[in-house]
Image (tube, grey):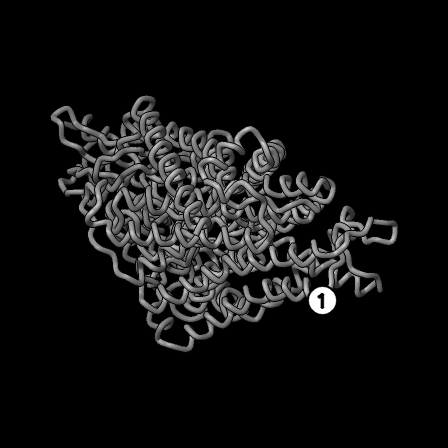
Amino acid sequence: METLLASLRISVATMLICVGGYSTAVWAFGQTVTPGTAEGSLITLPNGTIVGSRQIAQGFTPPKYFWPRPSAVDYNADAAGGSNKSPTSADLTKRAEETIARYGATPQNPLPAELATASGSGLDPNISEHAALYQAPRVAAARGLPIAQVEALIHKQSFKPGGFLTSAKLVNVLELNLALDQRGS
Amino acid sequence: MLLQSILFVALIVGGTALISWPLGRYMAWAMDANAFTRLFQSIGGASTRGTQDWKQYMLAMLAFNIVMFVVCFALLALQQYLPLNPDGKGALEGSLIFNTAASFTTNTNLQHYSGEVSLSYLSQLAALMWLQFVSAATGIAALAALARGLAGRELGNFFVDVQRATFLVLLPIALVVACLLVSGGLPMTFHGAAVATTLEGVQQTIARGPVAAFVAIKQLGTNGGGFFGPNSTHPLENTSFWTNALSMIAIIIIPMACVWMFGRIIGRMRHAAVIFGVMMVLLLVKITGAVYFESAPTEAFANLAVEQTAGNLEGKELRFGPTGGPLWSVLTTSTSNGSVGAMHDSLNPMTGLMPMIGMWLNATFGGVGVGMINMFLYMVVGVFIAGMMIGRTPEYLGWRVEAREVKFAMLALLSHGFFILVGTAVFAATPWGRDTLNNIGPHGFSEMLYEFTSAAANNGSGFEGLGDNTMPWNIATGLVMLLGRFIPIILPLAIIGSLSAKRRSAESSGTLSVEDGTFAGMLIATIFIVGALTFFPAATLGPIAEHLTYMK
């Protein structure tokens, strides 16, 4: 009985401090220091509409936009997930064939691997600079822009995610498309 | 590329190993009598003043864990009526509640639900995050008691120990890590999901919540349960290369420090260094294997117009770099963490074997507290075998190891294999398992093998394609998690009870040293024979068969 009572008392104490106190402290820190990202890195247009989160991929299908990596959950940011298919699975071959057809990739101009693979969350917001340049001719043609201008924008927006610890540069697809739209209109 | 990978692994693993030394020293102080002891005694009440024998210590631990389970169960079952539910999450199914409560009580964090789909913020914080603190503290307390027993001291009082581990060890570190994660871009909000209108004009609902606080303790306490379904692959749970690096450090730091804490309490730092070295060797072997095997491109694209220069990117996030996924998969399964930074189901077949080996051994640093306890079991068996081989009375730290202790140790170690292999066999032979697979052939077998391995090892990661939210899976893995948690805590405490009834002899030149390379070699051999060979046949049916059949 005493054992049970001690368990209950400690449960209350840990609940108050580790759930109530700790969560509140971290919340207050976040709202003070990084209020933007603490709310989910939302991007709001001047007219007040939320166009998405800069951390979260969204689907793009028209040729005038850069396309993100395939998503096993169709970019559902309310129920994220990966394909969970084995890399030896015939299902992945089939999915990749459809993707290749959509991009019009050929053995001479093969598709960058990340554009054929779904990410773990289905919400990977980035593609590599290489995969963006791969798509630049399509985007430039669809927008009637000189390709050099599109490529310059890609280079301007690309970043190394881990500094000297990574070699490939990445681009955030939503931000790249936003920049294009703002330039084009 | 290769140089960057090596540098990255060295920085994460080596850097954390360095920090673990002072942390182990701090933990030894925190878990000993100090200025806070009186405060913790007054919080716990009258019964927490005295010291406990091993049975009282165990019963106190069980009582507290039963309360943990019941509170979590009640909060989950009532979530639709409780506050902090901005997205109006509804009722959960009974067997799922049982599985989830068992999962978080046992420090496993196997998740048959998806956080952003099913749980309110109150359920996430008060039911699950609370258990992420106190279940981890339970493990640290058990290790402290075991070490004190080996040092010939009184075991202490569980109720005081669990508060020391919670308030002095986990809470301050979690606070620091959570603030760093928030600064790195993780959300920490009580607002419900945001609704965006995408550039294409489609509605996108973006789940968010008090993520940063949850993630910090999920990693530090080797819990591993994700706020979101896809765990640390989710961009709002792990926003960048740097939050990924910090998360990996948080995964292994306390398990590493536990070895040093153990060494300080028993007063044998050289012995602790040998144990640390053995664990480190095993860890590095698995990391090398995983990074190597994952550098092979996705086999399904072998004959397609896809570049074959990068490694396998299915189930991976680009921002973590090429090494992030496989490195994480080993760290999270060497410790009993179980969060994922890449989808394990989509790892190359032999890469997927590395996490399984980690969980089969469950002692390459292992879960907070309990990993070192598992290593203690291997050491008991190891010194017994060595003693038999050289014809001397087996001793460990001056304690005579006899039939009774070895029986307990073997029972604990073999129960691990029993749960995994029998569970997998039953589910592979029946629709319970067969009808829930996401992949065919040997990979489907791997999904079931991984699920029982993860449950028994209290890990919590999964080959997540498995449709595991069914009544048979919920109940079977729920029971395996409970047995896989408490058997390897209770039996070692029983060994301590049995040892301390004997007279401790002074170590002499005739005693097998526990501080040299011979001991290290013997320990690795024991781990290999008891741990690895038990599972080799199962491995050949799953990952090895898949590799040989499908990889060119």
Measured as percent of width and height from the top left, residue A60 is found at 22, 43
Tell me the element at label 1. Answer: helix
Which residue is rendered at x = 49% and y = 72% of the image?
A: B422
Which residue is rendered at x = 36% and y = 59% of the image?
A: B99
Quadrant of the snapshot with the C terminus of chain A: top left
Mark 1 closeness class: few <14, some 14–19, many ≥20 residues within 10 Å: few
Q: Which residue lies furthest to the left in this view?
A: A47
Which residue is rendered at x = 35% and y = 28% of the image?
A: A25
Amino acid bearing label 1: Ala
Give the left or right position of residue B186, taking residue B92 as reference. right
Q: Residue furthest top?
A: A32
Q: Which one is in front, A14 or B532?
A: A14
Which residue is rendered at x = 18% and y = 46% of the image?
A: B88
Measured as percent of width and height from the top left, residue B27 is found at 58, 36
Q: Which one is in front, B9 or B89?
A: B89
Residue B479 visible somewhere in the drawing? yes
Above or below, A6 relative to B532 = above
Q: Which residue lies furthest to the right in this view?
A: B509
Measured as percent of width and height from the top left, residue B281 is found at 66, 48
Q: Mark 1 lies on which chain?
A: B
Q: Mark 1 points at which residue?
A: B403
